[in-house]
Amino acid sequence: MAASLVAGLNPAAAAPMLNAKAAAGVAGKARATAEEFETVFLNSMLQQMFSDVGTGPFSGGPGAGMWRSFLTDEYAKSIVKSGGIGIADHVERSLLALQEQP
């Protein structure tokens, strides 16, 4: 709303406001995408880690394997939410650097 008011008065003054808002939107999307990538990566690693868990006589039954993917997905989301392991930071920087190239 404020940008449209400023644009009505002075279009040149509105451009920096709109560019800053667009840049913030791109940065937010880049961060969300980077965190989603880290979640998928961690989920894959956790699934490998838990692949042999429960193969003995006290394995939890046939349903345990079916729910394990949900458990590893929630573990991965929790790890990323609490700061992650640093992959998202690198991916975010790479995404933003690619956006800045002509």
Image (tube, rainbow, N blue to C red):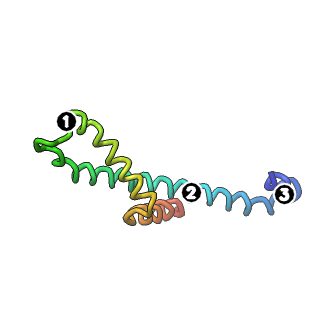
Residue 93 is situated, as x and y percent measured from the top left of the image, at 47, 65
Which is more toward the observer, 19 or 50? 50
In this rendering, would 18 be left or right of 81?
A: right
* SS at circle 2: helix
Write down the residue under mark 2: 28
Q: What is the spatial separation of the Cα atoms under label 1 and label 2, in whole angstroms?
A: 43 Å
Write down the residue under mark 1: 61
Which is more toward the observer, 62 or 25? 62
Which is more toward the observer, 46 or 9? 46
Which is more toward the observer, 100 or 47? 47
* SS at circle 1: loop
Residue 50 is situated, as x and y percent measured from the top left of the image, at 22, 50
Q: What is the spatial separation of the Cα atoms under label 2 and label 3, in whole angstroms?
A: 25 Å
Callout 2 amino acid: Gly
Callout 3 amino acid: Val
3 or 1: mark nearer the eye: 1
Residue 23 is situated, as x and y percent measured from the top left of the image, at 62, 60
Write down the residue under mark 3: 6
2 or 3: mark nearer the eye: 2
Q: Residue furthest right?
A: 9
Q: Which sits earlier in the primary sequence, circle 3 or circle 1?
A: 3
Callout 1 amino acid: Gly
* SS at circle 3: helix
Could you classify mark 1 by the number of other residues whose Cα lies within 10 Å: few (under 14), some (14-19), or many (20 or more)?
few
Residue drawn where x is 23% and y is 39% of the image = 65
Q: What is the spatial separation of the Cα atoms under label 3 and label 1, in whole angstroms?
A: 65 Å
